[in-house]
């Protein structure tokens, strides 16, 4: 006998791509056309008070389309892929039940993929003593040395994780310590069968143009008050060691405010780190299956690109006459 789940697979539209490629503008247009509600797939936009550095949609943009997974935690909350997945599954069911299209938009590859394909991680519990040992090692020898420990046992995970992402590096080390399995191998064993009627659109762009847009975006963030935003977070007692404060823009500007760099040096480092982050994003997404890629290099051809994306969605998702 068919279960209710068998009878109905919720539709799920997903838009991925590197930072600064143009996801926000496109997502708003698509959400309005396809009667969708947007679920942020960015692991940093969950934090309140971290608006400029995470490039959150503006109040006007948020008013155009209902958004989820934005401003749900204070910056000292240890947000995880497991929480993201759990919340998204519930949101998808709720949005679908109201006759709207769930639409994940973002660039955190593992987070988005875990929802699309219902990942299950055999994490093997936890070992607080082991975690404390790794924390002490990082304090004594630095982030790069801890990252090198991961590189020795799991080079693929080390390539994906930035040396400053201490919490996730320690978790990857802990998984290997507890289970004898590398996190990267666990990811490869996922069946990658989706519980949804799924359409994933990936945006790409000429590398030189993308890097130019990244630099322009960072310059705009500075004009919009990135330094003041970080200053305010530090004044509220949020330590630079927090996962949230290790995010792009926050770590570099915090280091400037604490006298480790000049402002010019911090901005140069931020631009370099963001370029590297975009490369890691593209590398992750290119290993995902089911993505229909659209080149956004010719920004003046937005209407043509939009038509192509509409065609991709129409091909992958079926809509009833009452949907729009």
Image: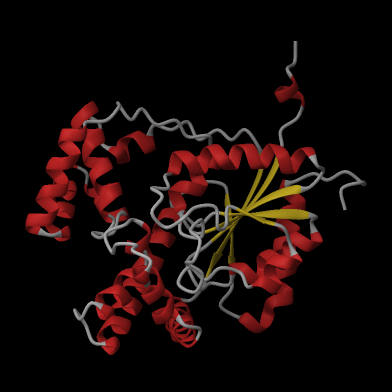
Single out the residue that lies furthest toward the top.
1
On the question of residue 180 being in view, the answer is no
Residue 268 position, x and y percent, is 30, 83
Residue nearest the viewer, comparing 131 with 182: 131
Q: Residue at x 24, y 87 (%)?
A: 262
Colour scheme used in the picture? Answer: secondary structure
Counting every numbered tag in the picture gives: 0
Among the 4 quarters of the image, the one containing residue 304 = bottom right
Q: Is residue 31 above or below residue 275?
A: above
User: Which residue lies most toward the right here?
Assistant: 321
Of 298 and 99, nearer the camera is: 99
Does residue 151 appear to the left or right of 287 in the view shown? left
Question: Is 26 drawn above or below residue 128 in the view shown?
Answer: below
Residue 36 image-quadrant placement:
bottom right
Which image quarter holds the N terminus? Answer: top right
Q: Nearer the viewer, residue 232 or 151?
A: 232
Q: Residue furthest left?
A: 140
Query: Is residue 8 shown above or below 253?
Result: above
In the orientation shown, which residue stands out farthest toward the front?
Answer: 236
Residue at the location (42% across, 58% down)? 75
Instruction: Identify the residue at image location x=83%, y=45%.
Output: 319
Quadrant of residue 94 within the rendered picture = top right
Q: Position of residue 181 (x, y in %)?
A: 25, 31
Relative to the observer, which residue lies in front, 44 or 163? 44
- Residue 280, image x, y percentages: 37, 61
- Does the rendering let one see residue 214? yes
Query: Where is residue 46 shown, x and y percent of the image?
Result: 51, 56
């Amino acid at each position: 006998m068919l279960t209710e789940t068998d009878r109905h697979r919720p539709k799920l539209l997903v838009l991925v791509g590197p930072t600064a490629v143009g996801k926000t503008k496109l997502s708003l247009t698509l959400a309005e056309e396809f009667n969708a509600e947007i679920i942020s797939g960015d692991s940093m936009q969950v934090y309140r008070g971290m608006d400029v550095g995470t490039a959150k949609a503006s109040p006007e943009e948020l008013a155009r389309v209902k958004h989820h997974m934005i401003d749900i935690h204070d910056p000292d909350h240890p947000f995880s892929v497991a929480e993201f997945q759990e919340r998204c599954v519930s949101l998808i069911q709720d949005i679908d039940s109201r006759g709207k299209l769930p639409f994940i938009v973002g660039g955190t590859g593992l987070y988005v993929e875990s929802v699309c394909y219902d990942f299950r991680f055999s994490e093997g519990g936890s070992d607080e003593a082991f975690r404390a040992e790794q924390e002490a090692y990082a304090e004594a020898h630095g982030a790069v040395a801890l990252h090198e420990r991961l590189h020795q046992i799991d080079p693929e995970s080390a390539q994906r994780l930035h040396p400053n992402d201490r919490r996730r590096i320690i978790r990857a080390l802990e998984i290997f310590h507890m289970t004898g399995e590398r996190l990267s191998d666990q990811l490869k064993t996922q069946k990658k069968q989706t519980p949804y009627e799924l359409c994933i659109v990936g945006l790409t762009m000429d590398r030189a143009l993308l890097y130019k847009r990244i630099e322009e975006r960072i310059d705009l963030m500075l004009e919009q008050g990135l330094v003041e935003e970080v200053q305010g977070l530090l004044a509220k007692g949020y330590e630079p060691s927090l996962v949230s404060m290790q995010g792009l823009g926050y770590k570099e500007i915090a280091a400037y405010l604490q006298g480790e760099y000049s402002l010019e040096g911090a901005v140069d480092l931020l631009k370099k780190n963001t370029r590297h982050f975009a490369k890691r994003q593209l590398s992750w997404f290119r290993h995902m299956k089911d993505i229909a890629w659209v080149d956004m290099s010719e920004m003046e051809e937005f209407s043509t690109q939009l038509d192509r994306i509409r065609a991709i969605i129409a091909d992958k998702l079926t809509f009833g006459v009452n949907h729009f």
